[in-house]
Image: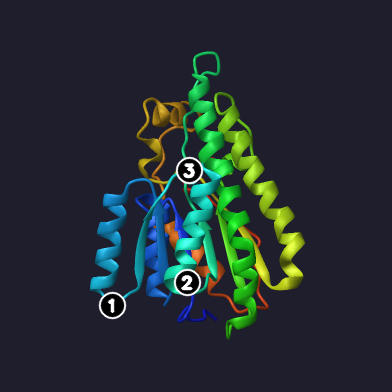
Amino acid sequence: MAESLNNTVALITGASSGIGQAAAVRLVAAGARVALVARRVDRLEKLASDIRAKGGGAIAIGADIASASQAEGVVAHTIAEFGRLDTVVNAAGVMLNGPSIESPLSDWDKMVDVNLRGLMYVTKAALPHLLAAVGTSPRKVADVVNISSVGGRFAAARVAIYNATKFAVTAATEAWRQEYTRQSLRFSVVEPGAVATELWNAEGQWENFTAMFGEVERLLAEDIAEAIAFIVTNPRRVAVNEIVIRPTDQP
């Protein structure tokens, strides 16, 4: 049975669009206050304003989480504003796939920086606050939900570095789960297939996908947000370690 997130605080990266934005809206509906994190501050401010207008609690924090100092600052800002941190959703990500011989190293670096380093830096900074929240929350549990991909389970041609980052996210999440599960800090990984988000806007990304899998009806960001809400609203005794979600049409 789903529990209320009243009196809890969630920090969500990649909140200016897609899965991060949908997750923020969904967790607010469950009762959480949210710290919205991304580089596009104008979008964050609009989302935060919309949430506050409906009676929710939200702040917008513009940052590049690929910088360790900025990631630490995001967590510190959240604690200064709300006084606690119960949930982290690491939803920031980029996908720049294509033939490896043609791909610029800058694209590979960007995927490593956002998909992996940013997630690592935010998680590292958040750990002490999440563990502290376990002791002060009536729910006696805290959560980290990392957004990986089916590309973090199965490698494919022309997807090497994206695969590498998402395999790393899936592996790190499981290792952290084992490390902190006895302290009631749950780590979960969500691995979506194709979702209709801005991830596909970079040149050639959808064409690269359809060349491998054909046309599919993509998932909505709200579909993934429901999975995130399911994970974090479970009672303390229930830990959902991993969820794979594909479009029905995706092989």
The mark that comes first in sequence, 2 or 3, is 2
Q: Quadrant of residue 100?
A: top right
Left of 213 or right of it: where is 61? left
Q: Relative to 64, is 13 above or below?
A: below
Numbered label attached to residue 121? none
- Report if the CB atoms under discs 2 and 3 are less than 8 Å apart: no
Amino acid type at circle 2 is: Val
Residue at 71% over, 60% down = 177
Which three-letter amino acid code belongs to the residue tagged 1?
Answer: Gly
Q: Which residue is mark 2?
A: 9
| Residue 133, quarter of the rendered image | bottom right
Looking at the figure, which quarter contains the C terminus? Answer: top right
Question: Which amino acid, by three-letter code, is at mark 3?
Answer: Gly
Image location (x, y in percent) of residue 50? 25, 65
Q: Secondary structure at mark 3?
A: loop
Q: Which mark is residue 55?
A: 1
> Quick check: can you spot residue 243?
no
- Label 1 to label 3: alpha-carbon separation: 29 Å
> What percent of the width, then of the height, locates residue 246?
51, 49
Provide the residue designation for mark 3: 93
